[in-house]
Image: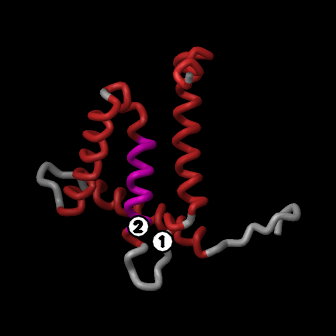
Amino acid sequence: EIGGYDLSFTNSALFMVATVAVASGFLYLSTSSRSLVPSRLQSVSEMAYEFVGNMLRDAAGTQGMKFFPLVFSLFMFVLVANLLGLFPYFFTVTSHIIVTFGLAALVIGTVVVYGFMKHGLGFLKLFV
């Protein structure tokens, strides 16, 4: 308890940390020994990278590629969280609505802030 708030470390928090650790570890290990002829792990990470890159380029054009790190991070988080949830006795983090809400709020907040930075107050005209 800190400042009257209960900050318990729940199984949801544990598996979110585990998800980030597994995703980061996989991407680090798969790209640490890059070679001209890729290993299986490197091929899998490159396929995920190209999949997200092509999808983002098709949906938002080349201007949308500035959001690639955010989109790729979200993709890997959701993918690994759902894959970990397939194991018996593991916890599926994305089954909690607050996690889904948090990810959605992050994306919406990013879009709104970027919209105001690029268009100023004229950004509000897009909502009318």
- In this view, the residue in front, 124 or 40, is 124
Chain-order first, disc 1 or disc 2: 2
Quarter of the figure that contains the N terminus:
bottom right
**How far from the left and from the top, in percent, is residue 105?**
58, 45
Number of numbered discs overlaid on the protein picture: 2
- In this view, the residue in front, 14 or 31, is 14
SS majority, magenta: helix
Which amino acid is tagged 1?
A: Thr
Residue 76: numbered disc? none
Q: What stretch of residues is rendered in magenta?
A: 69-82
Q: Residues within 10 Å of mark 1 (few under 14, many from 20)?
A: many
**How far from the left and from the top, in percent, is residue 73?**
43, 49
- In this view, the residue in front, 76 or 35, is 76
Quarter of the figure that contains the C terminus:
top right
Is residue 1 highlighted in magenta? no
For residue 14, side relative to residue 81 (left or right): right
The residue under label 2 is 82
Furthest residue to the bottom?
Answer: 89
Q: Residues within 10 Å of mark 2 (few under 14, many from 20)?
A: some
Residue at 58% from the left image edge and 15% from the top image edge: 122
Residue at 18% from the left image edge and 63% from the top image edge: 40
For residue 83, side relative to residue 4 (left or right): left
Q: Are marks 1 and 2 in contact (CB under 8 Å)?
A: yes
Disc 2 secondary structure class: helix
The residue under label 1 is 92
**How far from the left and from the top, in percent, is residue 33?**
25, 56
Residue at 57% from the left image edge and 61% from the top image edge: 97
Q: Quadrant of residue 45?
A: bottom left
Furthest residue to the right?
Answer: 4
